[in-house]
Image: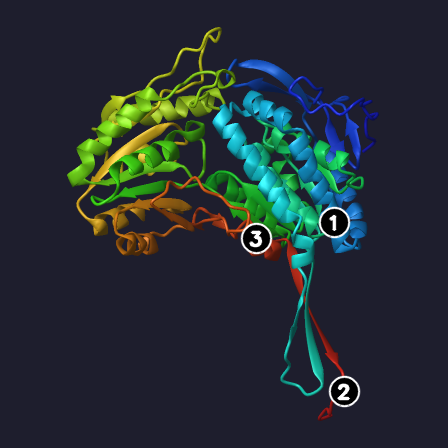
Amino acid sequence: MAQTPQTERAEPDLSADADWNCLYVDGDWHGPGDREELSVTDPSTREEWTRVPAGTTADVDDAFAAAKRAQERWAEKAPDQRAQLLQRVAGLLEEYEDELQELLVTESGSAQLKSTVEFQTAAADVAEAATYPSRAGGDVRESTIAGKENLVKREPAGVVAVIPPWNFPLHLSIRAVAPAVALGNGVVIKPASDTPVTSGLVIAKLFELAGAPPGLVNVVPGRGSEIGDRVAGHPDVDVVAFTGSTDVGRQVAKQAVDTLAFPAMELGGNGPNVVLEDADLENALSGSAFGTFSHQGQVCISINRHLVHESIYDEFVAGMVEKAELLPKGSAHEGNIVGPIINESQRDQILAYVEETVEQGATLETGGGTVDVDGVEDSLVVEPTVLSDVEQEMTAACNEHFGPVAPIIPVEDDEEAIELANATEYGLAASVWSGDRNRAEDVADAIDAGMVHVNDQPINEEPNVPFGGMKASGIGRFHGDAIMRELTETKWISVQREPRQFPM
């Protein structure tokens, strides 16, 4: 496909006021041309703030062709050259911190606390990835055959497709892009439709400014329904790094496996928060509120349900109500803690879950509606909501509600807490609170989740620790040695140093 003319760019502008109406393929920024355009809105104001091209399958093909060409040359670069590119990206992140946080506030409705945490996490991801080129070397293994040397090498997987979500767009995209590039791969990003700038285009701009060769990182915005299958199932894709819902992830994984690409999947969760009777209650309440209401509950590893010992149940419910009612809420532009839900359909689903749960017999302790925002006719800000008398089978507890909702379930003992914690198809993140470390670790060991945090809430992610889930919560792990394995291929080369006697 013939590309549309390159858009002229002056001084680098990464602000929310920049012209983002482009896709980025083979080192060129291409305007919409004859493509459709997607409207991108600010969740706080509900006003359009930019538009981006709706990429086509032909654009996807061009992006993969560019990535494949660039990757073959990039893989030949010395480790220090690849590391230096990542170090320059890390420096640019620091230089443009204010602009990047402004983009997160504007595009994803991130309150200041969340945008700061997301920026810091993304910066840590890049800094860690800069160490991978010197860490991903091979190994020498002993042989059972005299005079033979076994070399185990790691080579780039090839072309990595990155399909990030809208909730932590910068971090959850760059945590795959940076390691992929560091390890010698080419990249094609299909950004989230609600956040195409922070999950794709701004990352391309950072790598361009850092001096990445044309085609190494490509970004094709577009509707998942129109180009998603082509990205995930492209003949030239070698790894598909996807973060999102389990239902969509199953489809993406099928597309990837059909081409024999590796599906690196972080999928849905239904995080249990177990609070035992010997916990430091005030600390547990603070952590539980943070793990529930941060970024309006739009976090895959947030607390989805609280499993609280019956002896402290009433006190815990009262404490959560107090925390919820004190939280500043409203526009993400005004220093609030709880900002808007990403879009109307997500908001309506959250409110429907709450309503259904109350109809099923739960008690609405606080919240359950929306917060008025000045100048906004139909606010997307959902009140922090606390539900008591909840049972596991109720809608807000058995589904991943992805909102600022705290369903609280009483439990009699550790065994019931473990049983309920595991009564879900998901197994992403969990947390356990207790004054007895051994007891807490026993409960943590019994919970089927990829990540369990003792005396802490579950919204934790560190760039050197494996991140991922069990059961329907994903395949594989991000970060550290785990992501280095997933983004490379292992090759065994044996060298017979001395003549070998054969029986033929």
* Corner quadrant of residue 281: top left
Which residue is found at the position 79% from the left and 46% from the top?
Answer: 70
* Corner quadrant of residue 268: top left
Is disc 3 in contact with disc 1, using a CB cutoff of under 8 Å?
no
What residue is pinned by disc 2?
Answer: 498
> In front of the other: label 2 or label 1?
1
Q: With 177 as the anchor, is 340 left or right in this view?
A: left
Give the x, y percent position of residue 316. Answer: 23, 33
Quarter that holds the C terminus: bottom right
What residue is pinned by disc 1?
Answer: 82
In three-dimensional space, the C-alpha distance between marks 3 and 1, rounded to whole angstroms, equals 17 Å
Q: With 394 as the anchor, is 291 left or right in this view?
A: right
Tell me if mark 2 has few (under 14), some (14-19) or many (20+) residues whose alpha carbon lies within 10 angstroms of its own. Answer: few
Quarter that holds the N terminus: top right
Give the x, y percent position of residue 78. Answer: 78, 55
* Corner quadrant of residue 65: top right
Earlier residue among tags 2 and 3: 3
Give the x, y percent position of residue 249. Answer: 51, 42
In three-dimensional space, the C-alpha distance between marks 2 and 1, rounded to whole angstroms, equals 36 Å
Q: Is mark 3 on a helix, strand or loop?
A: helix
Q: What element carries label 1?
A: helix
Residue 1, label in figure: none
User: Mark 2: which amino acid?
Assistant: Glu
- Asked whether 504 or 11 is in front, the reply is 11
Which residue is found at the position 65% from the left and 40% from the top?
Answer: 231
User: Mark 1: which amino acid?
Assistant: Arg
What residue is pinned by disc 3?
Answer: 480
Give the x, y percent position of residue 42. Answer: 55, 18
